Image (cartoon, helix red, strand yellow):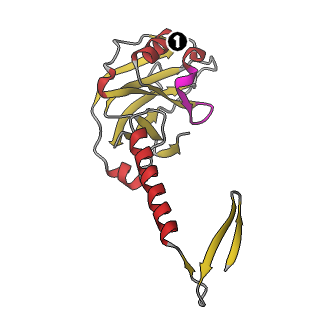
């Protein structure tokens, strides 16, 4: 019998002559119970918006596009007011996720030009935030194109317009209410994909 040191103490390992570790029935039973508890914790946590969701990228890529409603475009007046809803990709682009009415009120206070409040009973608002400055051609700098959703997890696709921007710090949001979305996992901008924190 050999022993392997673990943080929690000593764990006995029974080895046969060929060096294969044999597990006792007690070890197998404990592993089964732990697997069952982990599965329960996963399914119980799926309803909470801040829990981690694991989905294969290939599954998201081929998923159907979710229905988008109530598109919104706004100029950001004070990003600090809703900073807790912002998931940055880099210093120029971020994703905004709003899950409830209280979050929408906070978001609305920091933006100019938002429309009606979405109904959060069946999804959430997601928007692409850009800190590019004011475009000289007057066109909107970003566009939310599609969101693919699998089991509440999403792949958000958007585009940024090329052009000339003034260094005035203008920040814009383009978004929509997305049915069935609980949390975005990946933001795709002009074909480049960014895994969100």
- The residue shown at (28%, 44%) is 64
Quarter occupied by residue 47:
top left
Image location of residue 128, percent across then percent down: 47, 29
- The residue shown at (54%, 18%) is 82
Quarter occupied by residue 151:
top left
Is residue 128 visible in the rendered structure shown here? Answer: yes
Q: Is residue 178 above or below residue 55?
A: above
Q: Is residue 17 above or below residue 50?
A: below
Image location of residue 75, percent across then percent down: 49, 15
Q: Nearer the viewer, residue 74 or 49?
A: 49
Q: Nearer the viewer, residue 22 or 79?
A: 22
Helix, strand or loop at label 1? It is: loop
Left or right: 58 in relation to 119: right
Left or right: 8 in relation to 89: right
Q: Which residues are magenta?
A: 83-92
Residue where numbered disc 1 is placed: 110
């Amino acid at each position: 019998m050999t022993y392997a040191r673990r943080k929690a103490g000593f764990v006995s390992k029974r080895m046969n002559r060929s060096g294969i570790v044999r597990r006792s029935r007690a070890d197998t039973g404990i592993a089964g119970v732990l697997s069952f508890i982990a599965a329960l914790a996963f399914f119980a946590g799926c309803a909470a918006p801040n829990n981690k969701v694991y989905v294969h990228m290939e599954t998201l890529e081929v998923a159907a596009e979710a229905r988008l409603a109530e598109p919104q475009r706004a100029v950001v007046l004070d990003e600090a007011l809703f900073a807790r809803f912002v998931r940055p990709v880099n210093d120029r682009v971020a994703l905004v996720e709003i899950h409830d009415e209280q979050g929408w009120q906070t978001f609305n206070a920091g933006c100019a030009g938002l429309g009606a409040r979405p109904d959060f009973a069946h999804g959430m608002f997601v928007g692409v935030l850009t800190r590019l400055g004011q475009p000289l051609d007057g066109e909107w700098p970003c566009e939310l194109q599609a969101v693919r959703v699998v089991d509440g997890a999403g792949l958000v696709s958007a585009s940024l317009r090329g052009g000339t921007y003034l260094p005035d710090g203008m920040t814009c949001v383009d978004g929509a209410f997305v049915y069935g979305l609980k949390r975005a996992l990946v933001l795709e901008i002009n074909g480049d994909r960014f895994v969100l924190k």
